[in-house]
Amino acid sequence: MRRGTRPLALAIATIGLLLLTSGPLRAQGGFTPSNRLDSLATDLGLTDVQKKEAKTLLDATYKDAAPVRQRLATTRAAVVLAVTASKPPAELQAAASAYAADVAAMTEIEMTALARVLKMLTDEQNAAVKTNGIRGPFFLVRGMFLDDKKWNTTPEDAGY
């Protein structure tokens, strides 16, 4: 290895090691949740009873989100069609506005679901959330109800 590349290789190896061994979930005992519900339960410190209530709530919300999920697919396809077919700016704007409205509706559903789960927390759990932060659960619910088959999978990429 050339002299100038050794520090770079060491830095890359160190970053890789940190990425593999770090993160709030691994820091809490090495447990890596296999799905969104387990991640929420770990991040928020849910009891078994609260976890069951959260699952019931999120299952129902997933079903209720179906019309918005379907509209998102339709309005996104309309934007793609408007762009690829070189439609006039007014048609592209209309398609983009319809899509944006559906994205906002889905975001509202996701954030309302998170708020309802947070309402289940005890004072002690709320104090822990204030200390540890809400970033993990916040990003975990983004795109939670987009999959037309299931919601409870760990997201690789949640994009509208």
Image (cartoon, rainbow, N blue to C red):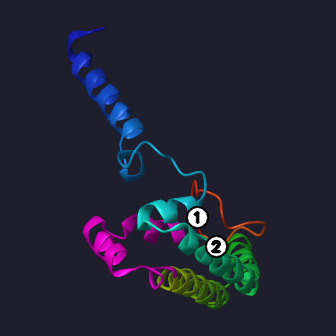
Q: Quadrant of residue 86?
A: bottom right
Does residue 46 lie above or below 58 as drawn?
A: above
Task: Tally the marks.
Answer: 2
Prevailing secondary structure of the magenta residues: helix
- Residue tagged 2: 55
Classify mark 2: residues with Cα within 10 Å, few (<14), some (14-19) or many (20+): some
- Residue 6 vs residue 48, the one in the foreground: 48
Q: Position of residue 36 (x, y in %)?
A: 58, 62
Q: Find the magenta span and give its range.
A: 117-141
- Residue tagged 1: 37
Please say whether residue 133 is one of the residues in the magenta stretch: yes
Does residue 5 lie above or below 102 as drawn?
A: above
Q: Is residue 30 left or right of residue 51?
A: left
Please say whether residue 90 is one of the residues in the magenta stretch: no
Q: Quadrant of residue 70?
A: bottom right
Residue at the image position 50 percent from the left and 65 percent from the top:
40
Q: Is residue 81 left or right of residue 16?
A: right
